[in-house]
């Protein structure tokens, strides 16, 4: 079992909060797609396993013309052994979705979408500098359903400047009414080199309020539970059977190859990451060189990664897996380090392992980091 990730580093507009790797100039789009297809060809020998998931992420892969997306799908099918039932996800923005494109995506074999909605409120979309409005978001979801796709997700961001609790509840209720089967909901983070950070520093937008974010997260958990969603990972909620196979595989430590600038790969032992620069990426592939750096994970890295990803998932940290990966000393160490979180009701324990409580979920990353002291 393995996965492919394909990073498309172009967007129509720069969202004020985003520090992912992308460019708003599309001059190099053809060269970029040829270079990614070449990287896919050059790295085919790195993987023997059958591919169960393909994920086009970004950036904004939905802005690719169909012919370019087809080039990448053909490269995947030519050089890798893709399972007939593979989950093939395309990140799509509402302003790119129309009936004609949706039909063409279907014909190419795309069978899942992650739609970048972020908010159903125009006032939020405005400060975010999104390229779509709320009405387009609803139409986009309807087109996806109309084309016969039932497996799709939407991204929403909460705890944003000026977002009221009523506003957040309205966003969630809109998603439920549309029948969205999977939600990825992220607390807004203020990244250093973003317009959002400058706007807050200049006092043009209010500071992010952590307590308000925690309240929004509580409400998110409560309302999604009432609506029948399974909270299977900190930021992810699915109706039964709609959990993302691709993301779940990442969290399980499954082997994956990442193509395109800034994409990461993992072969079970080594982690590789491609250069985050479009020019340098294209130039390197023109010279038949793979533009990545790599590191071999130490036993400690493997353990820490397991702790981080397991704690974020509903199944939690399993004692059996800690024993396998780190032995009895590791199990003893975690048992003692995690005790304070049980006292403050952030973590619960049973015979198989430890899970975060709803209260603890808001502190997941901090708790995981405090367990990272293993040698
Ligand atoms: C790199 S984006 C690409 C998705 C898509 N192209 C779009 O524009 O919506 C992936 C997702 O990360 C989330 N995201 C990015 N930056 C964030 C931030 N600073 N805080 C919270 N969520 C963020 C957004 O929900 C976004 O949809």
Image (tube, rainbow, N blue to C red):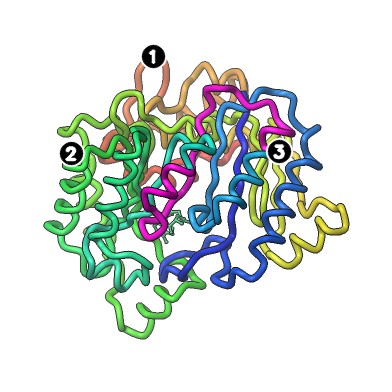
CB contact under 8 Å: marks 2 and 1: no
Does the Cβ of the disc 3 residue fall within 8 Å of ligand 1?
A: no
Front in this rendered view, residue 173 or 19: 173
Residue 229, x across and y down, in percent: 25, 32
Q: Is residue 304 left or right of residue 209?
A: right
> Which callout, 2 or 3, points at the residue further toward the start of the chain?
2
Which residue is the extreme one toward the top? 351
Q: Which residue is mark 2?
A: 222
In the rendered image, residue 97 lying in the magenta stretch gets the answer yes
Q: Residue at x 18, y 39 (%)?
A: 222
Find the distance from the CA under tag 2 to the CA under tag 1: 27 Å
Quadrant of the image occupied by residue 75: top right
* Image quarter in which the N terminus is found: top right
Numbered mark located on residue 326 in the image: none
Q: Nearer the viewer, mark 2 or mark 1?
A: 2
Residue 257: percent from the left, percent from the top?
Answer: 67, 39
* Horizontal and vertical percent position of residue 362: 32, 46
| Callout 1 secondary element | loop
Placement of 152 over or under 314, stated as above or below: below
Q: Earlier in the sequence, mark 1 or mark 3?
A: 3
Mark 2 Cα shell of 10 Å, populated few (<14), some (14-19), many (≥20): few
Identify the mark nearer the N-term, 2 or 1.
Answer: 2
| Camera-nearest residue between 164 and 72 | 72
Residue found farthest to the bottom: 202
Residue 314: x %, y % from top left: 37, 29
Rendered-image quarter of ligand 1: bottom left
Residue underneath mark 3: 297
Q: Residues within 10 Å of mark 1 (few under 14, many from 20)?
A: few
* Label 1 – label 3 distance at C-alpha: 29 Å
- The answer to whether residue 57 is left or right of residue 161 is right
């Amino acid at each position: 079992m393995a996965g492919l990730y394909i990073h498309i580093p172009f967007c129509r507009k720069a969202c004020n909060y985003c520090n992912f790797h992308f460019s708003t100039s599309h001059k190099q789009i053809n060269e970029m797609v040829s270079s990614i297809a070449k990287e896919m060809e050059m790295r085919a020998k790195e993987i023997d396993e059958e591919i169960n998931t393909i994920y086009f992420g970004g950036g904004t892969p939905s802005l690719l013309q169909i012919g370019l997306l087809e080039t990448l799908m053909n490269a995947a099918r030519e050089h890798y052994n893709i399972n007939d039932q593979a989950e093939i996800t395309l990140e799509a923005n509402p302003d790119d979705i129309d009936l004609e494109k949706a039909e063409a995506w279907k014909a190419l074999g795309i069978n899942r979408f992650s739609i970048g909605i972020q908010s159903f409120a125009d006032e939020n979309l405005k400060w975010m500098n999104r390229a779509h409005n709320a009405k387009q978001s609803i139409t986009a979801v309807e087109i996806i359903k109309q084309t016969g796709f039932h497996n799709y997700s939407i991204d929403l961001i909460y705890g944003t400047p000026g977002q009221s609790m009523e506003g957040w509840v309205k966003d969630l209720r809109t998603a439920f009414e549309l029948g969205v089967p999977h939600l990825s909901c992220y607390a807004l983070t203020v990244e250093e080199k973003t317009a959002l950070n400058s706007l807050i520093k200049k006092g043009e937008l209010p500071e992010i309020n952590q307590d308000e974010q925690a309240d929004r997260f509580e409400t998110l958990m409560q309302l999604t539970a009432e609506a029948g969603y399974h909270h299977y990972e900190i930021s992810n909620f699915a109706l039964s059977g709609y959990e993302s196979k691709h993301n779940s595989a990442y969290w399980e430590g499954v082997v994956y190859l990442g193509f395109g600038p800034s994409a990461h790969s993992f072969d079970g032992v080594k982690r590789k990451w491609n250069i985050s620069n479009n020019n340098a990426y294209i130039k390197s592939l023109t010279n038949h060189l793979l533009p990545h750096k790599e590191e071999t994970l130490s036993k400690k890295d493997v353990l820490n990664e397991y702790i981080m990803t397991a704690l974020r998932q509903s199944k939690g940290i399993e004692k059996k897996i800690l024993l396998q990966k780190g032995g009895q000393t590791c199990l003893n160490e975690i048992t003692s380090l995690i005790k304070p979180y049980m006292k403050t009701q952030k973590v619960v324990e049973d015979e198989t392992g430890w899970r975060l409580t709803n209260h603890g979920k808001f502190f997941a990353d901090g708790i995981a980091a405090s367990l990272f002291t293993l040698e």
